Amino acid sequence: MSEGIKSVSGVAKKTELAYFLPMAKIANRMSRRIVVFVYEGAQPIDVSGPLQTFDTASEEASGNDYRCCVVSVDGGPVRLQSGMTVLAEPLPKGARFDTLVIPGGPGVHAARKSLEIVRHVRELAKLADRVCSVCTGAFLLAQAGLLEGRKATTHWRACATLSREFPGVQVQPDPIWVRDEQIWTSAGVTAGIDLALAMVEADFGSALATRTARRLVVYMHRSGGQAQFSTPLALQTADSFGPLFDWLDKNLHRSLKITDLADEVGMSPRTFMRHFTDKIGMTPGKALEGLRLERAQSLLTTTTFSIAEVARRAGFGREERLRNAFVRRFSIGPTQWRQRFTENT
């Protein structure tokens, strides 16, 4: 766990706890208070995933726990994505709390255009000891100026947009979650659970976080990053490079250079590099490695080829290059990947 934020001790004044008393009796002085801010069109799992993680940690804890509430600008019913409605509390008035959670979802872009919502997010952040976003909730934090000059992540499909619209944010496209001092951001959807588990670990140690992960039936530390999902999908959804994707699919085993890709689409290497990076959100070299890793993943889990043969068929050539690429991207080697994800286990 990186440095930059101390665990929050929860000795609070009665006036500070007044807002939270209707939700639950404060069991002990170490309770962490979590506020989840919702808006129309927020993604339900971005709300429920962290809430369930903190609640499960409370059940597993011995004296140390979390007290959570869901708030909105006006309180009352808030319609989330997919038709789910939550009954939110009014905004807290001046009482400090430990963690502010901003979910993502299709409604985030309308929310960040609301001066009132952005103002309230900024004010809530001043009351919180740490602030976090789930998925595209990072856009709301960025709109409020909370990510300026900081490292942050979001859903892989939105990383390029976040970087383009907020150039002062140091967007990290691969990590499942990123912590920059008191600001925490996570990748897409279920990564909010990974983020909440990391917070539990920071607050109360790895033992409680591990018990919580077991109860939730999730990995305590997920292997790899979101880049393992992004490269093939990004290429397939980029209409202008669709034919290139088809060509690459048939030629990954070859030793390819950027000039080969540029020739295939009829561009100069410099023009191709610029257009490809703008459209896909990554360099051609990064995309090519991602496609080769995806091919290697498939071969590892569906065949009995040796690691050397997988490396050759995926275009890495040597086994060492395949292993280095796996460790760099997923933090585990190809043998460990096969053992963990093979279809025969």
Image: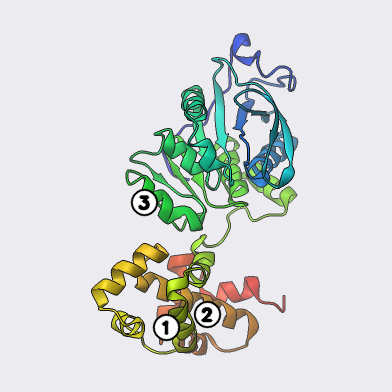
Q: Residues within 10 Å of mark 1 (few under 14, many from 20)?
A: many
- Asked whether, in this view, residue 217 is left or right of residue 227, the answer is right
Does residue 177 sit above or below 323 in this rendering? above
Q: Residues within 10 Å of mark 2 (few under 14, many from 20)?
A: many
Residue, disc 1: 316
Mark 2 vs 3, N-terminal side: 3
Q: Amino acid at mark 3?
A: Arg
- Asked whether, in this view, residue 146 is left or right of residue 209, the answer is left
Mark 2 vs 1, N-terminal side: 2
- The answer to which quarter of the image holds residue 276 is bottom left
Query: Where's residue 335, x and y in %?
Result: 55, 77
Does residue 149 sit above or below 288 in this rendering? above
Q: Nearer the viewer, mark 2 or mark 3?
A: 3
The numbered mark at residue 156 is none
Local SS, label 1: loop
Residue, disc 3: 164
| Nearer to us in this view, 105 or 311 | 105
Q: Kindly report the distance in space between the C-alpha atoms of the residues bearing marks 2 and 3.
A: 31 Å
Local SS, label 2: helix
Q: Nearer the viewer, mark 1 or mark 3?
A: 3
Residue, disc 2: 296
Does residue 283 sit above or below 267 in this rendering? above
- The answer to which quarter of the image holds residue 59 is top right
The residue furthest top is: 15
Mark 1 vs 3, N-terminal side: 3
Query: Where's residue 56, x and y in %?
Result: 72, 40
Instruction: Check contact, mark 2 vs mark 1: CB within 8 A.
Output: yes
